[in-house]
Image (cartoon, helix red, strand yellow):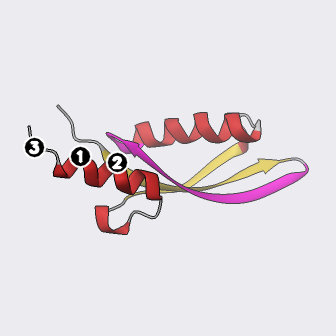
Amino acid sequence: MSEVKVFRVTGEIRKPNYQTGFRKEVRAVKPEDAVEKIYTEVGSKHRVKRFQIKIIKVEEVPPEEIENFTIRKLTSGESERVE
């Protein structure tokens, strides 16, 4: 079974009257899954189509550098649990 990692995705939203950058952390097994999750979440929240979202960078984040509190808690909880 694959291990879930944390990825930081940087990109920008380009609508005709609105442009902004974003940086978001997501949990995924591989970078492609992280990008797919970003398209889904950002598209839904900002009502933009996939072609209006430009992904600039996807990087894996080590557990000690995670900025999102919820994701940090989830990740640390996984490593503490022994099965």
Mark number, residue 74: 2
Mark number, residue 78: 1
Span highlighted in magenta in the image: 17-31
Cα distance, mark 3 to mark 1? Answer: 8 Å
Q: Which residue is mark 3?
A: 82
Q: Position of residue 42 (x, y in %)?
A: 65, 42
Tell me which corner region of the image, top left, top right, bottom left or bottom right, holds residue 65: bottom left
Q: Residues within 10 Å of mark 3 (few under 14, many from 20)?
A: few
Kind of residue at disc 2: Leu
Q: Residues within 10 Å of mark 2 (few under 14, many from 20)?
A: few
Q: Is mark 2 in CB contact (under 8 Å) with mark 3?
A: no
Q: Position of residue 41 (x, y in %)?
A: 60, 38
Mark 1: secondary structure? helix
Q: Position of residue 72 (x, y in %)?
A: 37, 57
User: Which quarter of the rendering shows the C terminus?
Assistant: top left
Kind of residue at disc 3: Val
Cα distance, mark 1 to mark 2? Answer: 6 Å
Q: Main secondary structure of the magenta part?
A: strand
Q: Is mark 3 in CB contact (under 8 Å) with mark 1?
A: no
